[in-house]
């Protein structure tokens, strides 16, 4: 089974863009991904494409994958749309890795896109609830903010986690996002800002919730048979893990963790042959502040119940022992649903190839991405490894468009 | 003494919210309907059907009989949530009344409650429920008086209260209380002497054949707090007898449930051996019933009312939907009517499934067993009991799906919990909205409420109420 490598990854700006279409955003991401390849990767080399999107705002159309790949000129390339709610992008990457490892393709495009800000607030709330359990959970009156708030409440009850610890996730991620020229919300927020923001779903305030965002992201996954045609700086997909679970929170074995994340992480670490402590940085699914705390525990970064003190300790800050969400995460970089998973891979690629600008982590070897669908109905974890040790962060300038 | 039927138990439900007449006076400069000090106000997710379900549950529990024994279910209301379309069969489903039982709906008149009671007399074991929540235009007397409540009666041969006599009378009296086709507001032409005459003369004629000697409590139709006392001469009873079981002073005009609520109060008190019930329906007609309580334990009842909460007038207008917009333009989480219909045992009675192999509980009872992962044929288990809040949130204005936006506009932020139920040492959890605040670890009970209306079809299901709160 050939190894899979990431040879390029790029994203559009994430934000609110009334002047852009889902196709134009995808085009920007695609061109940035191609430009990020060390040596040229001609589009004719692409054998296969997987595109993640939920289809917010009436874009849940048949053939929405080919609609974007055809738009960038990939006529004839087989394209499959991947839908796993907010994990659609991460699963598109996993599909690309599987296509390479199966031997069916040498060069695969994994992409994702979403346009979420061109509809009314009421319509957004409609769409935010379609990826949950609709017959019981949603009809109890919740969207995802409510379901994650229930998880936060359960975690607070079980482990004395505090609202301030939730707010520290927001403060950290905004600090990182302020350094990311592609982030949606490029401003820092104080602890007081996060604490005093209006309540969305108790105990979650507005600053504990990610924005709705327009954007697209792409990654180029290639086989070890061809990787040297495109780069000498090889970034291997070292570990892949995925799992699914009950769509409704009430149907799961725990509310203080995401079992699918735990299973996905275990499999990813196994295939990578590493332990959580080997990870140098991680992009985790922080759609709500509590989700990042749950991720710390589910991914094995800290003991169960210790996520609150862990974020408080500064361990996950940019200069901490395990920087988490250096891109700003979903909270600050934004959460264009179908593009989020591939967007995480863009950050991992930049960090591992030393192109992360002001938020560059010192000489990382292993980077992890963690992408969750719904409130935990699906999860996918990737571990990326830079095969050749870099002596120090050689290039800290972001060069893409 | 003749015996038309026997009342075994009574159950009463009134909504938690009250508004004082002074709040109307502050807003309008006056409060027109005499003799009403406060009135009951349904929550944004309550209507005649949900109140009927609550009262019916109480009467059945008080009666202590097997629901399978019910032969007949009668539902009386002037405010059915649908103008056309059977609701009584849904009520039967909510209460677990067997499908073989006949159902009948009585509407179009405030006399409907006593008509249902009389119709139920023809059956061995009957459940009679009157529930009502009339509305009027905000500046009309009828609206100022309009209250809400429900009363239910189980009739069976072992009942302690005997319905001994009945009289009725009808005569044309156009222009007394009416509701136009398609309107939600009751109106009256407000010719005081004409309406009072229709009221007293009709009741008097109905009472002609009913002996009134020995009556210590008289349940009389109460569109306001003064009108029932005009029937003292017609019924040959003292004002004190009417006051003894009057509910209008505290609950307002409860329409078709007015006389049933007062009758229930008289029977539940245990203080009265002979009770008269006199209903009046505009148009006009009247029923007069005589009820005698035999020796023994009296009528079993569940009429306790606790935890009332007082509304300000603006909060009242919101709850009424008088100052909020309705409906959603962008669609709700679409659950088709057939999908909804298949889940009615769960929506109405919390029927979970127990795995025949590993005994684990699964809700809803479909798909692979949550315990052993096998696809099994579940044993139905009804979870209509107390549950424990496992986790909870309060959904603020921005956090509700659009299908709950109207409810939130009317009633404000609402709690959503995951509640754990136990059965035989196994547990199962389900999500649901809270009707009042509850914390993690708190005990809650299921109640039937309006969930939302989609494609014009009101859909009802379970919400949860703290055990200690009003219910």
Image: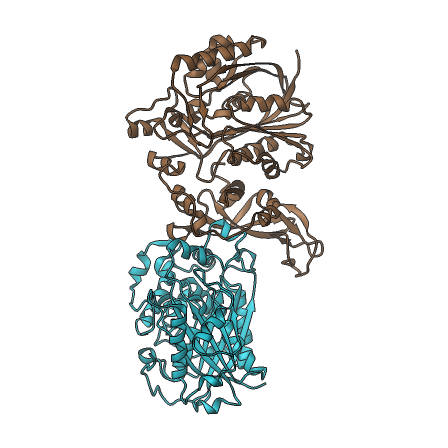
Chain colours: A cyan, B brown
Q: Quadrant of the N terminus of chain A?
A: bottom right
Q: Split into 4 quadrants, where in the image is the C terminus of chain A?
A: bottom left
Q: Is residue A38 above or below residue A267?
A: below
Residue found at x 47% / y 26%: B254
How far across and down, in percent of the image, does residue B336 sit? 56, 50
Splitting the image into 4 quarters, where does residue B273 fall? top right
| Residue A13 as seen in the image, left or right of residue B343 | left
Q: How many numbered dots are placed on residues in this image?
A: 0
Q: Is residue B385 visible?
A: no
Q: Residue at x 56, y 21 (%)?
A: B114
B276 in relation to A321, above or below: above
Position in image of residue B128 (x %, y %):
59, 27
Query: Residue B319 placed where, x, y %?
Result: 40, 38
Quadrant of res A98: bottom right
> Which one is in front, A185 or B261?
A185
Instruction: Give the side of residue B358 with respect to residue A249, left or right.
Output: right
State whether residue A345 appears in this view. yes
Q: Is residue B247 above or below residue B234?
A: below
Task: Estimate the x, y position of residue A126 in percent, counting from the top left.
Answer: 44, 55
Picture quadrant of residue A330: bottom left
Foreground residue, B299 or B163?
B163
């Amino acid at each position: 089974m050939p190894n899979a490598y990431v040879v390029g990854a790029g994203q559009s700006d994430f934000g609110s863009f009334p002047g852009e279409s889902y196709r134009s955003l995808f085009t920007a991401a695609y061109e940035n991904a191609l430009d990020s390849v060390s040596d040229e990767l001609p589009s004719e080399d692409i054998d296969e494409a997987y595109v993640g999107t939920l289809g917010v705002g009436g874009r849940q159309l048949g053939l929405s994958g080919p609609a974007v790949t055809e738009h960038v000129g990939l006529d004839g390339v087989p394209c499959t749309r991947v839908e796993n709610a907010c994990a659609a992008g991460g699963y598109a990457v996993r599909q690309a890795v599987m296509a390479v490892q199966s031997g069916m393709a040498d060069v695969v495009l994994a992409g994702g896109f979403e346009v979420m800000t061109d509809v009314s607030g009421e319509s957004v709330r409609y769409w935010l609830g379609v990826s949950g359990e609709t017959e019981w959970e949603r009809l109890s009156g919740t969207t995802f903010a409510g379901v994650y708030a229930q998880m936060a409440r359960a975690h607070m009850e079980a482990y004395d986690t505090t609202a301030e610890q939730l707010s520290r996730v927001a403060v950290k991620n905004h600090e990182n996002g302020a350094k990311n020229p592609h982030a949606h919300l490029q401003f820092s927020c104080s602890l007081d800002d996060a604490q005093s923001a209006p309540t969305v779903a108790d105990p979650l305030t507005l600053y504990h919730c990610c924005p709705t965002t327009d954007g697209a992201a792409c990654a180029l996954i290639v086989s070890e048979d061809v990787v040297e045609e495109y780069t000498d700086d090889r970034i291997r997909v070292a570990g892949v893990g995925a799992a699914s679970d009950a769509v409704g929170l009430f149907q799961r074995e725990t509310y203080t963790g995401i079992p699918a994340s735990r299973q996905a992480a275990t499999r990813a670490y196994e295939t990578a042959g590493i332990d959580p402590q080997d990870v140098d940085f991680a992009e985790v699914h922080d759609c709500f502040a509590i989700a990042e705390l749950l991720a710390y525990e589910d991914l094995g970064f800290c003991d169960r119940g210790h996520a609150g003190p862990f974020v408080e300790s500064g361990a996950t800050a940019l200069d901490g022992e395990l920087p988490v969400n250096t891109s700003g995460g979903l909270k600050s970089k934004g959460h264009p649903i179908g593009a989020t998973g591939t967007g995480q891979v863009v950050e991992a690629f930049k960090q591992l190839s030393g192109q992360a600008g002001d938020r560059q982590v010192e000489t990382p070897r292993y980077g992890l991405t963690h992408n969750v669908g719904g409130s935990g109905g699906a999860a996918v974890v990737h571990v990326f490894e830079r095969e050749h040790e870099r002596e120090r962060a050689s290039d800290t300038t972001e060069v893409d468009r | 003494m003749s015996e038309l039927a026997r009342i075994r138990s009574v159950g009463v439900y009134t909504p938690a919210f009250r508004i004082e007449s002074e709040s109307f006076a502050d807003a309008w400069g006056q409060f027109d309907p005499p003799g009403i000090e406060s009135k009951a106000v349904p929550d944004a997710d309550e209507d005649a059907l949900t109140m009927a379900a609550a009262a019916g549950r109480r009467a059945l529990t008080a009666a202590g009989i097997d629901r399978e024994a019910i032969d007949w279910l009668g539902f009386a209301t002037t405010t059915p949530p649908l103008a056309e379309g059977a609701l009584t069969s849904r009520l039967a489903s909510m209460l677990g009344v067997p499908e073989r039982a006949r159902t009948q709906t009585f509407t179009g008149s405030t006399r409907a409650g006593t008509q249902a009671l009389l119709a139920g007399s023809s059956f061995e074991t009957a459940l009679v429920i009157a529930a009502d929540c009339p509305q009027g235009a905000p500046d009309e007397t009828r609206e100022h008086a309009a209250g809400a409540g429900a009363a239910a009666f189980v009739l069976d041969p072992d009942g302690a209260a005997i319905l001994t006599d009945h009289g009725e009378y009808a005569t044309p009296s156009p222009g007394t209380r009416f509701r136009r086709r398609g309107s939600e507001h009751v109106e009256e032409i407000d010719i005081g002497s004409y309406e009072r005459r229709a009221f007293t003369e009709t009741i008097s004629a109905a009472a002609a054949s009913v002996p009134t000697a020995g009556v210590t409590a008289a349940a009389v139709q109460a569109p306001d707090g003064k009108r029932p006392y005009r029937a003292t001469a017609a019924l040959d009873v003292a004002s004190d007898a009417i006051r003894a079981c009057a509910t209008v002073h505290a609950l307002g005009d409860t329409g078709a449930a007015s006389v049933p609520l007062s009758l229930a109060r008289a029977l539940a008190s245990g203080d009265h051996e002979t009770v008269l019930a006199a209903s009046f329906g505009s148009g006009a007609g009247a029923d007069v019933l005589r009820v005698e309580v035999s020796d023994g334990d009296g009528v079993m009842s569940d009429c306790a009312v606790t935890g009332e909460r007082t509304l300000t007038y603006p909060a009242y207008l919101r709850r009424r939907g008088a100052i909020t917009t309705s409906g959603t333009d962008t669609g709700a989480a679409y659950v088709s009517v057939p999908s909804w219909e298949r889940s009615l045992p769960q929506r109405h009675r919390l029927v979970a499934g127990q795995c025949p192999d590993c005994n684990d509980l699964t809700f809803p009872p479909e798909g692979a067993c949550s315990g052993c992962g096998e696809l099994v044929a579940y044993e139905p288990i009804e979870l209509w009991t107390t549950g424990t809040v496992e986790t909870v949130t309060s959904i603020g204005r921005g956090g509700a799906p659009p299908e709950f936006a109207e409810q939130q506009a009317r009633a404000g932020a609402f709690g959503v919990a995951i509640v754990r139920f136990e059965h035989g040492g196994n547990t199962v959890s389900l999500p649901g909205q809270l009707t009042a605040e509850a914390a993690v670890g708190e005990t809650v009970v299921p109640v039937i409420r309006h969930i939302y209306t989609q494609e014009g079809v009101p859909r009802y299901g379970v919400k949860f109420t703290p055990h200690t709160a009003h219910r």
